[in-house]
Structures are given as C-alpha cells and as structure tokens.
Image (cartoon, grey):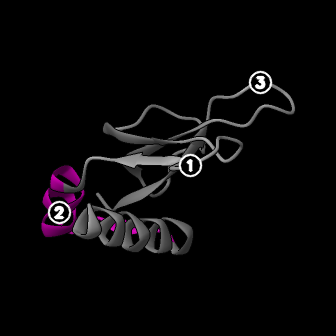
Amino acid sequence: MALKIRLTRVGAVHKPHYRVVVAEARSRRDGSPVESIGTYTPTSKGNPISIDLARVDYWLSKGAKPTDTLNAMIKKARKAAATA
C-alpha cells in the first residue's frame, strides 16, 4: 500500500479550497483519504496553508511520499513555523 501526501479539492466553482490528505497512490483525486492533515486556500490573504507538521512527520516516517507541490508547501510551512 503506497501512500501519498497530496491535495484534494473541496471548493466550489471559482472558489478553490483544498484539503491536504494522506491517501493511497492509486486512489482517485477526491477519493476517501486515510487522514486529513491540513487545508490550503489559495485565495486567502496572509497564510493560505495550514498543515499539522507533526502528522506530516509521522506519515513521512511511515513511508508516505509528498507530491512535488506538497513538498514545496511543507518546506514553506516549516520555515514559517521556525520564524514564528
């Protein structure tokens, strides 16, 4: 069972809102996730991403692979958490 940390869309038309989820690699984009670990709202001002970094570390230790987009977002979230 290969796991991926990726985005799933839950927003309306022209109002994007995403959940950061851990899901099986072969499941559909909006299929049922193993766990939801954060949110991403690209249209919001300030900090558009909210991720539970402890759960990200847990899933990475279990072998989950983040997508390229989520890898960049996790790095930004870690940098923001370090400066806060």
Callout 1 amino acid: Gly
- Viewer-proximal residue among 43 and 34: 43
- Residue 69 counted in the magenta span: no
Callout 2 amino acid: Asp
In front: label 2 or label 1:
1
Q: Which mark is residue 57?
A: 2
* Side of 5 relative to 28 (left or right): left
* Residue ID for mark 1: 46
Residues at marks 2 and 3, CA–CA distance in whole angstroms = 30 Å
Residue 39: image location, x then y, percent = 47, 40
Residues at marks 1 and 3, CA–CA distance in whole angstroms = 21 Å
* Residue ID for mark 3: 12
User: Nearer the N terminus, badge 1 or badge 3?
Assistant: 3
Contact, CB < 8 Å: mark 2 with mark 1?
A: no
- Viewer-proximal residue among 48 and 69: 48
The count of marks equals 3
* Side of 7 relative to 15 (left or right): left
Kindly indicate the quadrant of the structure image that contains residue 21. top left
Residue 51 sits above or below residue 74 on the image = above
In front: label 1 or label 3:
1
